[in-house]
Image: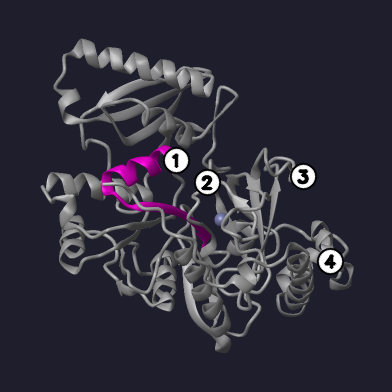
Amino acid sequence: MTIERPSVAIWDPEHECMHVAALRELQRERLKRIVRRLWTNVPYYRQKMQVVGITPSDIRTIEDIHKLPFTTKDDLRLCFPYEAFAAPLEKVVRIHASSGTTGKPTVVGYTRKDMETWTELCARFLVAGGLTSNDIVHIAFSYGLFTGGFGLHYGAERVGAAVIPVSSGRTERQIMIMKDFGSTALVCTPSYAIYLAEVVQNLGVARSDLALRLGFFGGEFWTDQMRREIQDEMLIFATDNYGLSEIIGPGVSGECAYQDGMHIFEDHFYPELIDPDTCQPVDARRGGELVLTTLTKEAIPLVRYRTRDICTLNPEPCPCGRTGVRMSKLSGRSDDMLIIRGVNVFPSQVEEVLLEVKGTLPHYQLVVERCGALDRLEVHVEVSGEFFADEMKQLHEMERTIERKLENMLGLRPVVKLVEPKSLERSEGKAKRVLDKRKDMAP
Ligand SMILES: [Zn+2]
């Protein structure tokens, strides 16, 4: 069975294929309006502008955005819960929050118009990835404070597809529903898709019993090898989409049928790339931290929000006809980036190597410890059952092979330990790839 590439379809050609000059003019107008809105309604941001000595009248062109101060997650924490809102609560119709690993969550709100924008943007990337009104969409994202489930839910309904709000967890039940209800499109995190494929196999469900043809994956970073694996195992056309609750949730960008980068919906979000250390602009092709400005959000507009996500931007025209700049898959988060003995290490690099090694499963964990003055990286990797039954000698050989490959990729040699299938913690949402024990040892 081969995977069919969906034909090009565009949900909102007027905006998605806008001529670049017209797009810049629209962005300029919208930026001016959003800055004025913040100045008038959000004392916290007005103060930040006053500190650097600018007023809304200093923002005349889109390049003037560089004069504006960045917004960070810490700013949002300081504004907890509603101080960053630029609309009164009576105008807010929805509240979501993103989980913080420490302390309070970040609270975000939507006005009725924000909900309409969000729904339209999710419809855009769903159609870009091949969704039609004939599809049955199986949403395995959790429904709750997390924006993923609801965003895709409303977007798919807008397209006219039939939505099954399965939510996360209870994997065997997920597969039963997929089979019985004839789900044609799967929505979840990429790591959960791989887990689902594994369980489908374990349950002895024949792939021909499932009607799946499309997959929309987001919520965490993944590699192209992982995409190939999902496509091969599940026989679905898999596209990547991106968003974060602070900005709007899913719907910031999404891939088209060419699977070559996610088109940013630039009529609503203005992207910049910066060096995370110096905060200076970097060459879009070399990559850096993505910074986003919401151009139309009413409830909680954010200017120059530092996403901490690392990617590149490709401004070349895309054969699909959309003009929005394409962002690459994320190569990691600037917070997740580990610095080990002076070398930058992203979990995604380890994943790329493992996907090339036969017998390893895409379940792994990086454990960093400090031994004396030196940092030590251990990579724990699950191997498939038949490999684990092999002789000790063969397992050791495999460990050495992976160590060599990782050394080539990373520029430092880690210690690789193969572990039994299913011995690393399984996640039904985001995978926990890094255990940095150095943090616990800090004075
Ligand atoms: Zn395209």
CB at disc 3 and ligand 1 closer than 8 Å: no
Q: Secondary structure at mark 4?
A: helix
Per the rendering, the mark at residue 171 is: none
Mark 2 nearby-residue class (10 Å; few <14, some 14–19, many ≥20): many
Mark 3 nearby-residue class (10 Å; few <14, some 14–19, many ≥20): few
CA gap, disc 4 and disc 1: 44 Å
Mark 4 nearby-residue class (10 Å; few <14, some 14–19, many ≥20): few
Per the rendering, the mark at residue 280 is: 3
The span picked out in magenta is: 224-244
Q: Position of residue 242 (x, y in %)?
A: 51, 57
Q: Secondary structure at mark 2?
A: loop
Q: Position of residue 281 (x, y in %)?
A: 76, 46
Per the rendering, the mark at residue 329 is: 2
Residue 84 showing in the rendered view: no
Q: Earlier in the sequence, mark 2 or mark 1?
A: 1
Viewer-side label of 1, 3: 1
CA gap, disc 1 and disc 3: 29 Å
Q: Name the image quarter holding residue 350.
A: top left
In percent of the image, x 63 and y 78: which residue is there?
298
CA gap, disc 3 and disc 4: 21 Å
Q: Earlier in the sequence, mark 2 or mark 4?
A: 4
Residue under numbered circle 1: 224
The quarter of the picture showing ligand 1: bottom right
CA gap, disc 3 and disc 2: 22 Å
Viewer-side label of 3, 4: 3
Residue type (three-letter) at the residue carrying disc 3: Gln
Q: Is residue 237 magenta?
A: yes
Check whether the beta carbons of the residues at disc 1 and disc 3 lie within 8 A of each other. Answer: no
Whether residue 98 sits left or right of residue 190 in the image: it is: right
Q: Name the image quarter holding residue 145.
A: bottom left
